[in-house]
């Protein structure tokens, strides 16, 4: 997970100052020394680190903090505010043209994941923004790129415009925009050739595509794992083309996260989206305030709720809640819930979005791997419909039959039955508490049904 090392260091540092009834200038200096080391270790640009430390220090030793009743909390709030500002302040939305089609150019170095990100972006625009995108295969130098985009288009059922590799990218882009107008595609996403390095000839080609029709967005796709190099690449592309935003890929794989903290400050261009996995729906709008909150271990409930709502049917969630109340929750429901949670992403990542969850002991080991899920499914699928509905009837001979059918030992079956009963009891208590008079309950469809 991105920022893991930085997150741990900052949380440790903050813990020391958090409960202090009095914060001295010396306390702030000691804290900022550790924050500086943590940021440098996370591969954050040196100038960015200096400015960040200066901003926090100046605000933290101000009279408002020193005289506050909760100075420790005030300092943490300042760190969170400055982290948010550093990453852009607020989410930067896509600029859609009032006269369609909106033209988006995708640029970047080879290996950053540009073609895959082009497909992911089209998927997001269709699902989240209700747009009708057209993908354009304008990378004529890497034959596999055209094929890759066409494969992605088929997979997503999104049209791809291509003219092979013998036509100039400028002509392909021009014809694609005409085609989009005819077919009423309201967004055109042009996948341009990746560069191994900043090459003047290829840069000129990008300028020629840009000159056809001033794009509404020029997105630079950069690999977060390249750290400081990502910032240098962003600077070079910005100087040559005037990019409008950055999409950071592989943010889920970079434990340092320095690129995400430096790019906005150095280029003055917003991070628009971040790639958080390999699946075609693993591209998320970048919210600086939410990311700052996650880095500091304060959770990110808004993103969690959005993830849950995207995966769960509201009616099913209500039906499930009713089942908990009436104790009619079955193993079929259990499997369905596990699969819903799995769709939302790795469990450890989801739990980190819950405020205070970083303090739960053993959270770092909270992973539901595919193998474990397959074992649970094998046991449940080896049960008869009657056993799934009423596990109390599962006696020793039934357990032996389930064990043979699933290929899992009887101990695992016993463990699952015990956990299932405990979970049902806990769910009944929690749904009862939540529906008590005068108590407000935040709905988290599907997810809250499993982790209340």
Image (tube, rainbow, N blue to C red):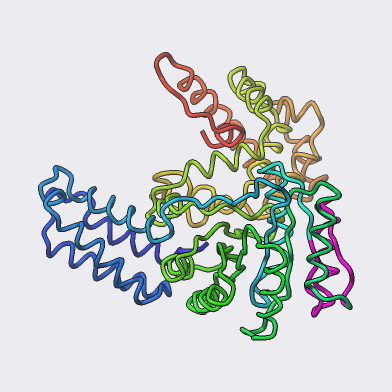
At 76% from the left and 51% from the top, the residue drawn is 133
In the rendered image, residue 148 lying in the magenta stretch gets the answer yes
Considering only vertical position in the picture, is 90 above or below 170? above
Q: Residue at x 67, y 83 (%)?
A: 196
Residue 39 against residue 279 in the figure, above or below: below
Note whether 238 is above or below 85 in the view shown.
below
Residue 195 drawn at (x, y percent): 68, 80
Q: Is residue 142 left or right of residue 218?
A: right
Residue situated furthest top in the rendering: 437
- Please state if 155 lies on the left or on the right of 37 as rendered: right
Q: Is residue 141 magenta?
A: yes
**Residue in the foreground of this view, choosing between 284 and 197:** 197
Residue in the foreground of this view, choosing between 155 and 338: 155
Rendered location of residue 384, percent (x, y): 82, 32
Place residue 13 in its image quadrant: bottom left
Q: Is residue 109 left or right of residue 393?
A: left
* Coordinates of residue 116 in the picture (x, y in percent): 72, 64
Chain part drawn in magenta = 136-165
Rendered image quadrant of residue 166: bottom right
**Residue under the point 50% across and 60% down:** 270
- Residue 104: which quarter of the image? bottom right
Q: Is residue 411 visible?
A: no
Residue located 37% across and 55% down the image: 296
How many dots with numbers?
0
Q: Nearer the viewer, residue 272 or 394?
A: 272
Residue 225 in sight from this viewpoint: yes
Estimate the x, y position of residue 55 in percent, counting from the top left.
Answer: 26, 63
């Amino acid at each position: 997970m991105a920022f893991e090392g930085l997150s741990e260091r900052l949380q440790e540092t903050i813990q020391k100052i958090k409960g202090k009834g009095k914060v001295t200038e010396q306390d702030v200096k000691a804290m900022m020394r550790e924050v500086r080391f943590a940021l440098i270790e996370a591969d954050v640009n040196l100038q960015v680190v200096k400015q960040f430390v200066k901003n926090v220090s100046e605000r933290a030793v101000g009279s408002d903090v020193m005289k506050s009743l909760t100075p420790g909390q005030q300092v943490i709030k300042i760190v969170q505010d400055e982290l948010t500002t550093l990453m852009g302040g607020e989410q930067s939305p896509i600029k859609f043209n009032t006269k369609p089609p909106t033209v988006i150019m995708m640029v970047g170095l080879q290996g950053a994941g540009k073609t895959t990100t082009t497909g992911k972006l089209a998927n997001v625009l269709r699902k989240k923004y209700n747009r009708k995108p057209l993908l354009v295969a304008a990378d004529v130098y890497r034959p596999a790129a055209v094929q890759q985009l066409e494969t992605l288009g088929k997979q997503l059922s999104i049209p791809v415009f291509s003219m092979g590799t013998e036509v100039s990218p400028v002509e392909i882009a021009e014809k694609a925009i005409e085609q989009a107008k005819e077919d009423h595609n309201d967004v055109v996403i042009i996948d341009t050739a990746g560069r191994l390095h900043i090459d003047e000839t290829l840069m000129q080609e990008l300028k020629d595509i840009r000159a056809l029709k001033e794009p509404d967005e020029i997105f630079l796709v950069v690999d977060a794992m390249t750290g400081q190099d990502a910032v240098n690449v962003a600077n070079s592309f910005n100087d040559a083309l005037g990019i409008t935003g950055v999409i950071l890929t592989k943010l889920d794989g970079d434990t340092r996260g320095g690129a995400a903290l430096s790019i906005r400050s150095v280029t003055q261009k917003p991070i628009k989206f971040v790639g958080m996995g390999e699946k075609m729906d693993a591209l998320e709008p970048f919210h600086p305030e939410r990311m700052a909150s996650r880095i500091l271990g304060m959770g990110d409930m808004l993103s969690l709720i959005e993830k849950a709502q995207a995966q769960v049917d509201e009616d099913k969630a209500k039906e499930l809640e009713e089942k908990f109340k009436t104790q009619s929750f079955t193993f079929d429901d259990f499997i369905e819930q596990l699969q819903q949670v799995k769709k939302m992403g790795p469990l450890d990542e989801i739990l980190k979005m819950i405020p205070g969850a970083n303090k739960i002991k053993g959270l770092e080991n909270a992973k539901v791997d595919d193998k474990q899920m397959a074992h649970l499914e094998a046991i449940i699928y080896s049960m008869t419909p009657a056993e799934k509905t009423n596990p109390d009837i599962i006696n020793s001979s039934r357990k032996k039959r389930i064990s043979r059918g699933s290929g899992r030992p009887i101990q695992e079956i016993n463990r699952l039955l015990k956990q299932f009963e405990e979970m049902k009891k806990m769910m009944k208590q929690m749904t009862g508490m939540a529906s008590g008079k005068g108590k407000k309950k935040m709905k988290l469809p599907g997810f809250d049904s499993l982790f209340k």
